[in-house]
Image: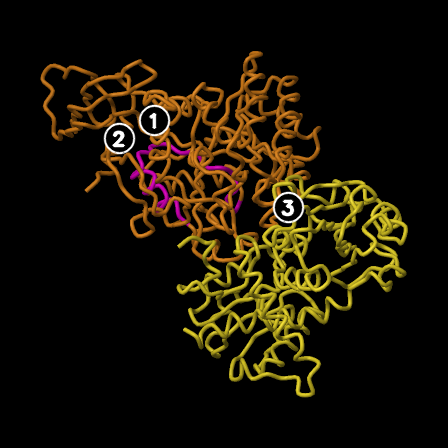
Chain colours: A orange, B yellow
């Protein structure tokens, strides 16, 4: 199968391409950029006039809910939403049921995902067995089975000695540790940022220190153990500043933010809007502004969706009794593009945050369109306006605070290893 | 329609009473004036008025309560309504039935009003958002968020003794962090124009952003009580204090308990209030609780008139419409 993508504006930050350029594909590979190879005859021509062509997006965190919570989503349903959103690779955190702490679970997920065929799916293994925070998981086995990193997600490891050993062990099997900075003791069952809004609504608060305290302690261990770590889902200005300083001192760390944190604040809780129940919580405008600044100056290298689809009942309860998280695959690109239209970020830098850099952090061959690269490609119209509605959302989870928002930027085509897995009708 | 408007119907009349936060001063004054009219009903020979005859009210209590539930029940009966008490600990949510399913079942029995107490902040808002259009919801306390009828009965009590809100200094003492009563009082006092609302307590019991509610924060009780006209003592929830909030009840009493000596720092005609039930010797000395400046039992009596006022305004509305 020969495909050509013509008249598009190609952006490939890794290869410093940013201009009108055609792309030529044979089977699953990119075989030429710019000029067609001699004798190239396309079976299929995609006219990308007015559109951006870029490497497929790489989402650092998407919960697909399978195995364990198929009433919220399945690998097939959620990867279909990913494909429609230009995402060609995504990374699954280990808190499935059962937890990803044995090769069997990794294999199950990979096999189901191959059957679905919408997207490449990568897995993070549990850092401790069953995410119990006490016993190291079999990291070498998990790595052999295909895990691209390890994480204890928001199950905080209370004993610093266990955390130190886990970091050391992960370093010796050469796995990146994905760290969620949240101190459960300080969070103390809180469900919203400890600020003016939580005070007014009488909602138990999660103080800023629940994040900064965890970051500070963790940085000390990272600096001593030399482990390679990635900070997940930052939400506070002060944590960003601490991580920025540590990077400046030369430590091998990276960080991400969820796209919604760049747009929403505690004020969006209004009178108990349960769609805004997320972890980490939505914080202040000052925090949001610093997160945006950090994305712009690369102290935060990655924007991810933090996709957490839910069934309807999960959000139909008083605020504190609802489950946290939002269905976010379909808003990842539009929310990032909003920063571009607000001139906070260049288009090319946005694509670095959504594709090039997350691929590097996962250490996978994706996020670039060099000759010979796998043809994972996203084509989108940056000027298309559309309204997110629960009727048209593809994910099984309709839980989004952005329902009824007018969004800008729409994916027209997604190619996965040269296969057209999504085409906007 | 914004969430804030949920308390009013399309004619701008009070449909639900969920929080005092954001209500106009006129609505608060209307409640107080209506309550004034009802305050004599209890002293008449026939203690009933037929305003809500034929209406069915459901006391939906997900948290134990004696005082609040009884005054709501009595208020409803004085207005000639039928009252159903549902105690949810023993009921179906513990069997896994969702809150929403339970509401649908009660709606199917043609009830007119839910009076809700729940331990999660926002529960009353949630219920109000999901009930059928003919049903009104009164919040009888949700988590740490609001207890608006308690807030209003305290305003009623203050107005009876002090008349003009715009010349008052009011201090609220104790566990502000966990108190829905304090939040409702603070909103009411600010809306009614009280120029200085103080909260007094240790750092551990005062929300970090308390000043954003429109109060002055004091940690020294002697300083905080100086020249105030009204002292509202809050109940110390002993079960919540276990752990790191407070070292002991003894130390709390020494620091923040209201004694005759500390009361002397307030204005000589200051009144002492408490939403009850009182922990004698923990937050207040008996000599003060039972003393001449205490209006604590009046609050209970006034609770009846204020709840009758709110119920009649909310349900009476439909007859006018």
Residue occupying the far bottom of the picture:
B46
- Give the CA distance from mark 3 to mark 1: 36 Å
In the image, what residue occupies the spot 82% across and 50% down?
A: B266
In the depicted structure, whether residue A30 falls above or below residue A206: above
Q: Residue B113: horizontal and vertical position, in percent?
A: 52, 72
Please, what secondary structure does the residue beneath circle 1 have? helix
Q: Is residue A365 visible?
A: no
In the depicted structure, whether residue A263 falls above or below residue A343: below
User: Do marks 1 and 2 share a chain?
Assistant: yes
Q: Residue A146: horizontal and vertical position, in percent?
A: 45, 31
Q: Counting residues from the N terminus, which is met first, the one under dot 3 or under dot 2?
A: 3
Please, what secondary structure does the residue beneath circle 2 have? strand
- Give the CA distance from mark 3 to mark 2: 41 Å
Q: Is residue A309 left or right of residue A376?
A: right
Residue A95 colored in magenta in the image: yes
Q: Are marks 1 and 2 in contact (CB under 8 Å)?
A: yes
Q: Residue B303: horizontal and vertical position, in percent?
A: 68, 69
Chain letter of the residue beneath label 1 in the structure image: A
User: Do marks 3 and 1 share a chain?
Assistant: yes
Label 1 Cα crowd, 10 Å radius (few <14 / some 14-19 / many 20+): some
Q: Are marks 3 and 1 in contact (CB under 8 Å)?
A: no
Residue on which the image places disc 1: A340
Please provide the residue range marked out in magenta. Answer: A73-98
Labelled disc at residue A382: 2
Label 3 Cα crowd, 10 Å radius (few <14 / some 14-19 / many 20+): few
Quadrant assignment, res A259: top left
Residue on which the image places disc 3: A189
Q: Residue B246: horizontal and vertical position, in percent?
A: 80, 45
In the image, what residue occupies the spot 71% across and 44% down?
A: B206
């Amino acid at each position: 199968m020969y495909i050509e993508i013509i008249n598009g504006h190609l952006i490939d930050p890794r290869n410093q391409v940013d201009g009108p350029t055609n792309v030529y594909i044979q089977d699953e590979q990119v075989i030429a950029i710019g000029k067609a190879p001699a004798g190239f005859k396309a079976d299929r021509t995609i006219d990308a006039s007015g559109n951006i062509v870029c490497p497929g997006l790489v989402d650092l965190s998407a919960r697909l809910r399978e195995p364990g919570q198929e009433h919220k989503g399945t690998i097939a349903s959620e990867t279909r939403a990913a494909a429609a959103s230009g995402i060609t690779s995504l990374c699954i955190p280990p808190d499935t049921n059962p937890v990803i702490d044995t090769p069997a679970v990794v294999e199950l997920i990979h096999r189901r995902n191959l059957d679905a065929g919408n997207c490449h799916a990568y897995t993070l293994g549990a850092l401790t067995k069953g995410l119990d925070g006490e016993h190291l998981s079999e990291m070498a086995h998990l790595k052999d089975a295909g895990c691209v990193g390890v994480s204890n997600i928001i199950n905080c490891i209370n004993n610093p000695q266990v955390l130190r050993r886990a970091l050391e062990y992960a370093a010796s099997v050469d796995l990146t540790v994905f760290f969620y900075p949240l101190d459960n003791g300080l969070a103390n069952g809180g469900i919203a940022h400890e600020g003016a809004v939580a005070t007014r609504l009488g909602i138990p608060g999660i103080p800023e220190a629940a994040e900064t305290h965890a970051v500070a302690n963790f940085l000390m261990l990272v600096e001593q153990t030399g482990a390679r770590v990635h900070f997940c889902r930052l939400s506070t200005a002060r944590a960003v500043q601490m991580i920025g300083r540590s990077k400046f001192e030369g430590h091998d760390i990276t960080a991400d933010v969820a796209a919604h944190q760049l747009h929403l604040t505690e004020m969006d809780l209004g009178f108990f809007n349960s769609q805004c129940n997320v972890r980490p919580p939505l914080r202040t405008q000052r925090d949001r502004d610093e997160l945006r600044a950090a994305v712009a100056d690369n102290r935060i290298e990655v924007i991810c969706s933090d996709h957490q689809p839910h069934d309807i009942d999960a959000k139909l309860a008083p605020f504190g009794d609802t489950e946290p998280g939002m269905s976010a695959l379909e808003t990842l690109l539009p929310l990032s593009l909003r920063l571009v239209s607000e001139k906070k970020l260049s288009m090319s830098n946005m694509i670095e945050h959504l594709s090039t850099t997350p691929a590097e952090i996962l250490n996978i061959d994706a996020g670039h369109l060099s000759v010979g690269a796998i043809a994972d490609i996203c084509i989108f119209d940056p000027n298309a306006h559309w309204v997110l509605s629960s009727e048209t959302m593809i994910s099984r989870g309709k839980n989004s605070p952005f329902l009824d928002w007018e969004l800008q930027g729409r994916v027209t085509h997604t190619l996965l290893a040269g296969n057209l897995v999504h085409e906007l009708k | 329609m914004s969430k804030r408007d949920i308390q009013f119907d399309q004619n701008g009349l009070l449909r639900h009473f969920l929080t005092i936060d954001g209500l106009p001063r006129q609505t608060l004054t209307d409640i107080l004036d209506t309550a004034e009219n009802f305050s004599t009903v209890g002293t008449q020979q026939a203690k009933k008025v037929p305003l809500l005859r034929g209406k069915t009210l459901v006391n939906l209590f997900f948290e134990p309560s004696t005082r609040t539930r009884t005054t709501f029940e009595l208020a409803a009966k004085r207005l000639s309504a039928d009252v159903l008490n549902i105690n949810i600990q023993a009921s179906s949510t513990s069997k896994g039935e969702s809150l929403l399913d339970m509401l649908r079942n009660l709606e199917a029995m043609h009830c007119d009003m839910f009076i809700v107490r729940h331990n999660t902040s926002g529960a009353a808002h949630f219920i109000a958002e999901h009930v059928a259009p003919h049903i009104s919801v009164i919040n009888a306390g949700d988590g740490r968020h609001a207890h608006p009828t308690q807030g209003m009965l305290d305003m009623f009590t203050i107005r009876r003794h002090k008349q003009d809100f715009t010349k008052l200094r009011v201090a609220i003492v104790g566990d502000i962090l966990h108190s829905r009563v304090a939040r409702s009082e603070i909103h009411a006092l600010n809306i009614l124009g009280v120029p200085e609302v103080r909260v007094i307590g240790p750092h551990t019991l005062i929300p970090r952003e308390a000043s954003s509610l429109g109060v002055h924060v004091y940690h020294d009780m002697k300083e905080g009580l100086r020249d105030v006209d009204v002292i509202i003592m809050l109940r110390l929830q002993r079960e919540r204090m276990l752990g790191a909030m407070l070292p002991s009840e003894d130390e709390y009493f020494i620091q923040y308990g209201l004694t005759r000596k500390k009361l002397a720092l307030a204005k000589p005609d200051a009144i002492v209030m408490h939403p009850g039930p009182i922990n004698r010797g923990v937050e207040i000395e008996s000599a003060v609780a039972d003393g001449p400046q205490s209006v604590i039992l009046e609050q209970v009596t006034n609770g009846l008139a204020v709840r009758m006022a709110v119920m009649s305004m909310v349900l009476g509305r439909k007859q006018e419409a």
